[in-house]
Image (cartoon, rainbow, N blue to C red):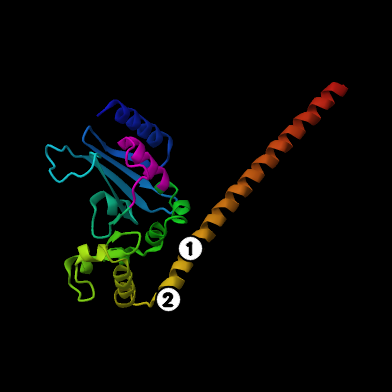
């Protein structure tokens, strides 16, 4: 590792030490694996692998560290990456940062996954998705969900011609709507209502958390003020004597 990478890994170690439910599973010069439990109680595993241009002829760009995120409802789902684990297309905004900094940004985002989900609908979809539904899903992307059938080309609705679809956003959205209608069994309008329900559920949970924190803070301040008033009274009493 370069000197900036070593310093960034030191930052990662510090964050893992000071943050509950953040565990470094593997840390070598060529591989990093971090497991995180978010506020939603969902589990995430961030994996990074070093790729040398000498060993990987398909490596593109200056970045030598790959980064992937696996998610699941249970810790065991991401630990063994079973059929109930899914991939999330999440990446740090600045790909030029040292690998430790990039992992830290993902760790903090996923640790606060409920708040992050308000900005990333894809993450919100994963959080509210039932575990049984995750068995049929492979990847959560920004614009669509990729299933086993879509990758295997087992359905006429999803022919698997990904190169052409990448250049035609309208076709991709039509495919997504078809997936919602035929695979999930709901119409586009129903899915829009479901998305809104997801957002409302997450917002309600966030409001509840904020209310609990606010009540706890108010209670603490009240107890502190009562303690100050008590000792002020005792001091006055002593001074009077």
Instruction: Tell which circle, 1 or 2, labels the residue nearer the N-terminal end.
Output: 2
Against 92, residue 231 (above or below) is: above
Residue bearing the label numbered 2: 190
10 Å neighbourhood of mark 1: few (<14), some, or many (≥20)?
Answer: some
User: What element does badge 1 sit on?
Assistant: helix
* Direction from residue 128 to residue 45 in the image, left or right: left
Q: Is residue 224 magenta?
A: no
Quarter of image, res 235? top right
* Direction from residue 120 to residue 55 in the image, left or right: left
Quarter of image, res 233? top right
Quarter of image, res 191? bottom left
Q: Residue furthest right?
A: 240
* Direction from residue 238 to residue 83 in the image, left or right: left
User: What element does badge 2 sit on?
Assistant: helix
* Direction from residue 6 to residue 225 in the image, left or right: right
| Viewer-nearest residue: 142 or 85 | 142
Residue bearing the label numbered 1: 199
10 Å neighbourhood of mark 2: few (<14), some, or many (≥20)?
Answer: few
Q: Is residue 93 magenta?
A: yes
Against 188, residue 219 (above or below) is: above
Against 183, residue 106 (above or below) is: above
Residue 48 picture location, percent across and down: 26, 42
Magenta residues (range)? 90-109
Q: Quadrant of the C terminus?
A: top right
């Amino acid at each position: 590792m370069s000197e900036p990478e070593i310093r960034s890994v030191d930052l990662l170690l510090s964050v893992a030490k000071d943050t509950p439910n953040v565990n470094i599973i593997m840390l070598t010069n060529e591989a990093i694996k971090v497991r995180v439990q978010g506020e939603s109680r969902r589990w995430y595993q961030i994996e990074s692998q070093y790729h040398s241009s000498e060993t990987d002829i398909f490596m593109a760009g200056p970045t030598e560290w790959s980064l992937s995120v696996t998610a699941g409802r249970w810790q065991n789902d991401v630990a063994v990456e079973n059929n109930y684990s899914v991939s999330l297309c999440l990446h740090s905004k600045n790909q030029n940062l040292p690998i430790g900094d990039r992992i830290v940004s993902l760790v903090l985002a996923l640790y606060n996954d409920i708040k992050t989900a308000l900005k990333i609908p894809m993450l919100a979809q994963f959080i509210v998705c039932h575990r049984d539904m995750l068995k049929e899903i492979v990847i959560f992307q920004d614009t669509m969900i990729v299933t086993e059938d879509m990758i295997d080309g087992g359905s006429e609705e999803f022919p698997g011609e990904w190169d052409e679809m990448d250049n035609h956003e309208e076709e991709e959205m039509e495919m997504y709507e078809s997936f919602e209608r035929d695979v999930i069994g709901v119409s586009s309008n129903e899915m829009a209502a479901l998305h809104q329900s997801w957002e409302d559920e997450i917002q309600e949970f966030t409001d509840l958390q904020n209310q609990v924190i606010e009540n706890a803070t108010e209670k603490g301040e009240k107890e502190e003020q009562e303690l100050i008033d008590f000792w002020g009274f005792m001091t006055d009493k002593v001074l009077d004597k």
